[in-house]
Amino acid sequence: PPIAAEMREGLKNLYSVLKQQDANIQFVFMTGVTKFSKVSLFSGLNQLTDITIDTRYSSICGYTETDLTESFGEHLVG
């Protein structure tokens, strides 16, 4: 769909700007549902490090897996 193509192009532009500023940026926190590795959309920003499952950053958003289990355990499947 045309709207999806426009959105992809907009994201590519954003990632290209971030890549150009690599020397000036130490840390960028990006959130979303799209994985960036091996996706052409992210070719403009191919130096990212995915910290999704890195334990050093497990509480970066203010909660841990233990917090979730303790608070919502009875509602979680598995």
Image (spheres, helix red, strand yellow):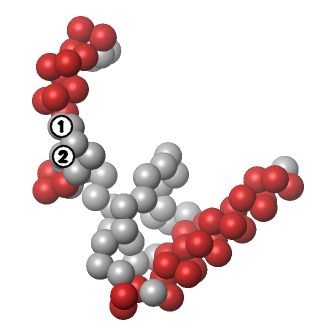
Report which residue position mark 1 lands on: 64
Which residue is the site of mark 2?
Answer: 59
Please, is residue 16 above or below residue 71 in the view?
below
Seen as rendered, the residue at the extreme right is 2
Residue 43 visible to an observer of this rendering: no
Q: In the rendered structure, which amino acid carries the disc numbered 2?
A: Ser
Under circle 1, the secondary element is loop
Q: How many marks?
A: 2
Residue located at (19% from left, 54% from top): 57
Q: Are marks 2 and 1 in contact (CB under 8 Å)?
A: yes
Q: Classify mark 2: helix, strand or loop.
A: loop
Looking at numbered disc 1 in the image, what kind of residue is underneath it?
Thr
| Residue toward you, 27 or 47 | 27
- Report x, y in % for residue 49: 33, 68
Q: Residue at x 43, y 52 (%)?
A: 31
Left or right of 13, for residue 30? left
Tell me where residue 15 appears, x and y as whole percent: 55, 73
